[in-house]
Image (cartoon, rainbow, N blue to C red):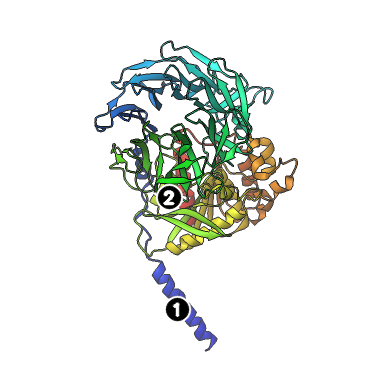
Amino acid sequence: MSSALLALRAALAFFLVACCLTPVASAQAPLPFERIRSALKAVHVFNDVAIAPDGLHFAYTDGAVHVGSVALPAKTVRIALCAGCTGSSVAWSPDSRYFAFVVTGAGGQGNVAVSDTAGSVKLLTRARGPLSTPRWSPDATHIAFLYSPRAPKAPGPLQPGTPDAGVVGSTYYEQRLGVVSPTTGTIRLLGPANLNIYEYDWSPDSTRFAVSAARGNGDANWWVAALYTIDATTGATKRIQQPDTQMASPRFSGDGSRIAYICGIMSDEAVTGGDICVVPVRGGPAVDVTPDFDATVTTIDWRGSANTILATDNRLGATCVTTFNVDGAAHHDFWCGRENIYANSYAQIVAGDNGISVSHDGSVSAVIRQSLTSPPEIAIGPIGSWKAVTAANANVPRLTGTAHNVTWTSDGFTVQGFLIEPLGYRRGARVPLITLVHGGPSYAAAPSFPAGLEAYAGVLAARGYAVFEPNPRGSYGGGEAFARANVKDFGGGDLRDILAGLDAAGALLPVDPQRVGIMGWSYGGYMTMWALTQTNRFKAAVSGAGLSDWLSYYGTNGIDTWTIPFFGASVYDDPEVYAKSSPIAFIKNVHTPTLMLGGTLDDEVPITQSYEYWHALKDLHVPAQLVVYPGEGHLFKKPADQLDTLRRVAGWFDHWLK
């Protein structure tokens, strides 16, 4: 056959493919940004829900505080609060007659309040400083809480930091354990003044606490926290164990003889997951009772006094409610679903330290449940047989199309992610696609409904993009070995997983290879910066709180203890392992237009990391823009700034990919 005829056939084949795969539009016309903003803000957000121990009442907060009867859930009572006040963190008394909660005034100060089921409220404390997490003692005589007296900011490095002044590192504010009597209102602080307490649990006899805590700067040292007990009367403190990895959610067994906690490699306080470890209260080695569990335990609570733990776990994109026999390591699944369920949450983005609220006899439970396409509502019933008792989001408009759970194989691992179709997608049409990489890396993209002004997936899908949310190695959901699989290999196997996932996504939707972008925040921002140095597959990029140089990062961030488990040593002992994963070392490979966003008070990833990347791209004549937000930390708090980032992200991709 002549070369001319071959060329003609090739041209005809290309024409036919282009004709079939490139219709006029891949989705309905992109929604105007104001409609997207209104839809995101219209989602009613629930903070927490709790079932009374006797199973007869429940209470929940959504800014307001509500209490109702399980038998008549539609007839809830809204608790009267002071003008401009909000409520959160509901906790029932053991006799089910009262519940405590945090009431926060218009100025931002939180205090402990108590209400009965009729809605009669009593304010217990007059705190001065951040306060959270009230819990009743089992004997109902006291309420404990976490308290940072006179601290200028909420604890935790995800919060905006305070500018340095004077001698650096000489001033910090510990989070203490406070105890108050419901009758007197007097606050007692327990434990030594230089011990920062992150989480706690009452012992069954109300005489002591199990706490995760670290000495020194609390914002910097959660990654080296140890397990302690604190006497509830004297405040005497005893260290039980220094775990080899991070720890979270200490919980006393029902007979008080053991403490369970979540153990594993973790990236952020309150964004926790791993295996279950159990240690005797008297001390001794901890035992990992779930060493071969191919999922990530996210919350735990003992059931009864024997050897059973009720947990929630992340299992390749699904949430499961599971019981574990800590002596025999057997487990039983009560329920699994491709949903995100929780009883309380951290900033409404991840499950908090209570994944499910259960009555004392286990017959009734409460959760907030949602999925990628179903908005959140409160549901009550036996575990796994919940019925919605609210309909606050019944008429919320959808911003996304069909959501797919995607699994693929990469380097022998089974990897999972979500693929979200554009709003109004027309089957068979080629689509632009944005890869949205989660933070962490010890975290996971969850099946949550787009809500609020940081819901990038919702914005992009409404603008006509397919959105791919991968959970590569290093993520939660595949067991502890999977979570550790990126140790000393940032940007290696995890990027291969993401690129292989893109191929899997392309097998489900016909993706236009010339209109593929990537974005992420925190570790996702790092992965964005890194990916652009390793592949030209992405045609536009957005990096939020991104990280460009692990060597300079180590000496300038406020949380350097987190890097040791992931890199195996400090940057001073093994600079090569940091250098090989640093985007700045390969910066001349970058040709992709890149938008960078960051806050001036970010202690987790200093804004200087984005300056380095931006400066290099500017010198290399690569289209780049850096936007700096004064007063913002790692996660933006100001609605105006959140809205501005949404506009810029959508605008950047629209400019370069459409």
Of circles 1 and 2, the one toward us is: 2
Q: Are the two marked residues, 1 and 2, in contact with CB atoms closer than 8 angstroms?
A: no
Neighbour tally class for label 2: few under 14, some 14-19, many 20 plus, Cα within 10 Å: many
Q: Point out the residue furthest to the bottom here.
A: 1
Above or below, comparing residue 562 to residue 618 in the picture: above
Above or below, comparing residue 227 to residue 584 in the picture: above
Sequence order check: which comes first, mark 1 or mark 2? 1
* Left or right, 89 with reference to 541: left
Q: Which picture quadrant has residue 63?
A: top left
- Identify which residue, 73 or 627, lies in the foreground: 73
Neighbour tally class for label 1: few under 14, some 14-19, many 20 plus, Cα within 10 Å: few
Task: Give the amino acid type for the residue marked by disc 1 in the picture.
Answer: Leu
Task: Give the amino acid type for the residue marked by disc 2 in the picture.
Answer: Leu
* Residue 159 appearing in the image: no
Residue holding disc 1: 12
Q: Residue at x 62, y 39 (%)?
A: 245
- Distance between the Cα atoms at labels 1 and 2? 34 Å
Residue 540: give x, y in percent of width and height. 53, 54
Residue 581: give x, y in percent of width and height. 66, 50
- Identify which residue, 156 or 633, lies in the foreground: 156
Residue 354: give x, y in percent of width and height. 44, 34
- Identify which residue, 138 or 517, lies in the foreground: 138
Q: Quadrant of the C terminus?
A: bottom left
Residue 460 is marked as: 2
Q: Which picture quadrant has residue 70?
A: top left
